[in-house]
Image (cartoon, helix red, strand yellow):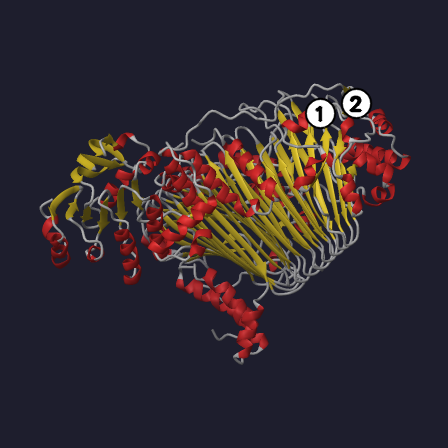
Amino acid sequence: MSSSIETLVNKEYQYGFVTDVDSDTLPPGLNEDVVRLISSKKNEPEWLLEWRLKAYKRWLTMTEPHWPNVKYAPINYQGARYYSAPKSVKPLQSLDEVDPELLSTYKKLGISLTEQKMLSGVAVDAIFDSVSVGTTMKEELSKHGVVFCSFSEAVHNHPELIQQYLGSVVPYSDNFFAALNSAVFSDGSFCYIPKGVRCPLELSTYFRINAAETGQFERTLIVADEGAHVSYLEGCTAPKRSTNQLHAAVVELVALDRSTIKYSTVQNWYAGDKEGVGGIYNFVTKRGKAHADAKISWTQVETGSAITWKYPSVILLGDNSVGEFYSVAVVNNKQQADTGTKMIHIGKNTKSTIISKGISAGEGQNSYRGRVQILPKAEGARNYTQCDSMLIGNTCGAHTFPYIEVANNSSTTEHEASTSKIGEDQIFYCKARGLSAEHAISLIVSGFCREVFKELPMEFALEAQQLLGITLEGSVG
Amino acid sequence: MNAPAATRYAEAFGQLDTAAAPPWLAALRTAALAEFNALGFPTTRNEDWHFTSVTPIADRTFRNATSTGAPTAAEILALTVGDASWPRAVFVNGQCDPTLSTLGALTTAGVRVSTLTAAIKDTPEFVADHLGKLATFSAQAFTAFNTAFAQDGLVVHVPRSLVVDLPLHIIHVADAQAAGCMLHPRLLVVAEPLSQFNIVESFVSLNGTEYFTNAVAEISVGDGARLHHHKVQRESTEAFHVGTVQVSQGRNSLFHSFSYASGAALSRTNIYTRLLGEAAETRLNGLYLVDGTQHADHQTWVEHIAPSCASRELYKGILDGHAHGVFNGKVFVDPEAQKTDGKQSNHVLLLSPTARVDAKPQLEIFADDVKCTHGSTVGRLDELALFYMKSRGIGDENSRALLTYAFAADVLETVELDALRNGLERIAFERFTHSTQL
Amino acid sequence: MLTIDNLHANAGDKAILKGISLTVNAGEVHAIMGPNGSGKSTLAQVIAGHPGFEVTKGSITYVGQDLLEMDPEVRAQQGVFLAFQYPVEIPGVTNAYFLRSAYNELRKAHGKEEMDPMEFLDLMEQKLKVVDMDPAMLQRSVNAGFSGGEKKRNEILQMAVLEPKLAILDETDSGLDIDALRVVAGGVNALKRPDNATIVVTHYQRLLNHIVPDFVHVLAGGKIVKSGGKELALELEAKGYDWLVGTA
């Protein structure tokens, strides 16, 4: 390694504290009774239990996928707990009833669950371990007919919407982790934007894993009705623990004709320590279905997790629909990420853009895996893909696995990729203008990610930039 | 459901004339057969064969080729591109025909060229030292298949510091007697340090019959040596072709590969090169032109193992009718391979609405001080350029033909042998314009 | 201000500078000339602290301090400025942000408050005039996609903002047409004050018509082979370097 890039002491993960709350936790293990128990704890209707059981039975026949470019010890699915909820959570009348310990947790995370968020124009749903602990700004939203609540509430209050759309984008049989999630998901967020409504607030969910040995399996479903418009933010943290914890979430987006869904994620699950002990296994299925003239845009900043395995995708079903994927994935120490997207062009004149920035430091391994599929009927479809990797230090790796499948000759696909190390000459140039090496690298890296950061809502962009700095601290000097 | 390959090919293996084989070769063949039997033909579940199904090959049981229709040199040369005066080695249905071959000029120049059969007899140690050492068959079903069944082939040894301008043209011909047969030609090239040499390998067919060519070439390019390998695959459109070129490169060496593919119902070309010595350079270029229901797959692997090596890759595909093109280009950079400079481009033109292409340009990088890029585009002819040409009075068909030819022109320009480049330009031009005027 | 004494420097195993001694006082303009490969650019980069060169012998004293002990960023904060021969591109980082970061580092180093973006924009407005630059350039990425002339102008803009004590212009004239050369030289002259000094590294005399040196030094084979006044530059222009290189 060069003289100007030398190792500093790693900055500690700042969200690694554990909250001491009384929890209602199931013993470890998974069987049909556990699925039934989860369903009954949530007082679910029969159809949902049946759906869960079908998913569970399907899961039993499936094997864990090993094609991603990541390595980890086998997961003991019978060793994990599939349900943990803070005991105090009963149907809440107002946020005042939330356990103060929980409120202070969210305060530490920088998320206010009180109505003061009104000022910043963000509505928040907070998920603690497996259940939602409170959703803010409901009244303001309901004035516009927007439904934003926990998944469990939605099952009871809007069963017709859940029944219509649950599994419509990611069927329970989709893949191993989606099947597992479908069987045991405990909560999540649901959001429905009625016809022609432009959601007046940014909707936001904060996920927090607290309990030990708990898997977190939340499910998010967003339905934008015709002509609706919504921007949704998702943030994630977890305490530091020396064991690996499984997070297998499913996100389904339904964008009906002429609607727009913008989904942004800042993922900062605990990444494990420098030796690779502990950390979250983040195995997530995210997919959206875009109907005619609709647009789905995924933006993600992935800095946490020991292992990330996720491919937010768009099925471009309707004519003229648009799919976008903007991603920054950073790995340091022993982190591994295999992430990318799938753009499936079915409708005519569909358009997709993929911008992926991978940064590898320490002994991190970063893989971009993307599939662009232009089906025979997708007349005039267009895709542009750019995927750039930056390497910091000589013990990391960057890998690019794009699959381009074109079956229509009126379509155009362009794919560009580059890999380079952070430039010594760039660092010297910055130093010659008085910047420290660390400042120089953070500047160069932010510049490298700029095309993605500018897609993030303002507050998130700042947070993302800081996270990037924290994640890379210690890798550069 | 067919019986496993192992059962179906046991008899053919038994028929091979192995009496003359030294024990090491017999052992190599037996081991290769065992590997082939264990692997069977690859399926699309195998990541390296994801886009290419070899079911048509796996479903058939090919025979050993035992006879030829004794074609004449004139008949064969009419099918090939290049200069008819080039020294040549002609293989008919997999067997070398010395009466059609003219190697005198190369022998005079100092290049040692002999058939595999002769080399095993005359220079057994040299063959034992090299055969199967580069093109290893572990987990490679088709290479194992070839290693077990290869009866004849060519051994080329270019001595140290020998610079020869005259190329060697290896012509593989299949005639009517090849119908239903499998041909397993083998080529071994050892270019010693500082030597320079050109090889052209042509695969042609005298009849439109169905047969299976499974060729393997292993090429060692020594320190400071420069070797150009050109492959012209114009098999019968009923035939199946799998060809693997496995190269290793020493310090400061240059390997240039050009692969042209327009034949075969189903073809797969593997060009694998390993950059073992510092500052070696590899250039891989190719052009594939297919239509009807043809399937043409190119797979290139460049393994940067030593530091400061450069790789340059440009592949172009033109697909018409219901043709299916596949390009999978892998660039692998080892942790030790600092200062690697890799560039790869793959561009595909789809002429018809029913043609399709799958591409997987892949980078796997484990070193930090590297510059690697790849670019891939798929599209049809530029409407604006077409309009521009038409507005200057050029008819639609002509405009399309000219633009299509222009698309292919830059990759053809990478061929340094004038006669070969001119010949390929001519056949590409004729194909698109249906005219012989260039 | 700057005293270089018997400076030797290597690039890898190769000796490039083989005993350079030079004194630069406040208010002076020194020109370093010489044929390609003479070590001119190396000297400039060693003064700025480029990590690619190793000083094997000799010393550089800058305002009474050992310059060689300082990191490049400390040298910059202490007023040493190198206008790069090949300014580096930093994609995605705007010129404005880059300049403000550099300017604030300088202020911090001197115990001053950081300047906020609005105030800084006002400052930039004045500085842009020095090099006749379009304000739109501030929103473009640092040097990315700039023409050769734009890059050189951008270097002088940075110099105008950072107001160095010691400015070293490394082949700032190369690749410039005559109009751009005038603008760049005009910028440098406008920034000249009695308490700062300039070292102009150049191959050609042309730039020195516009930035008039007090001293001219000829570098060949890693040593200064001749020093003189500004007339030496004209003599070199007429006679070339060969008559001097022989004596190296």
Is B438 rendered above or below residue A405? Answer: below
- Amino acid type for the residue under numbered disc 2: Ser
Residue B375 image point, x, y percent: 52, 52
Quadrant hosting residue B8: top right
**Do the residues bearing badges 1 and 2 touch, measured as CB atoms within 8 Å?**
yes
Residue at point 51% right, 26% down? A11
What residue sits right under mark 2 in the picture?
A88
Of C84 and C18, nearer the camera is: C84
Chain ID of residue with mark 2: A
Q: Earlier in the sequence, mark 1 or mark 2?
A: 2
Does residue C11 lie above or below C122 as drawn? above
Q: Nearer the viewer, residue A351 or B382?
A: A351
- CA–CA distance in space, label 1 to label 2: 10 Å
From this viewpoint, which residue is outermost toward the right? Answer: A46
Name the residue: 75% across, 28% down: A130
Is residue B87 rendered to the left or right of residue A117? left
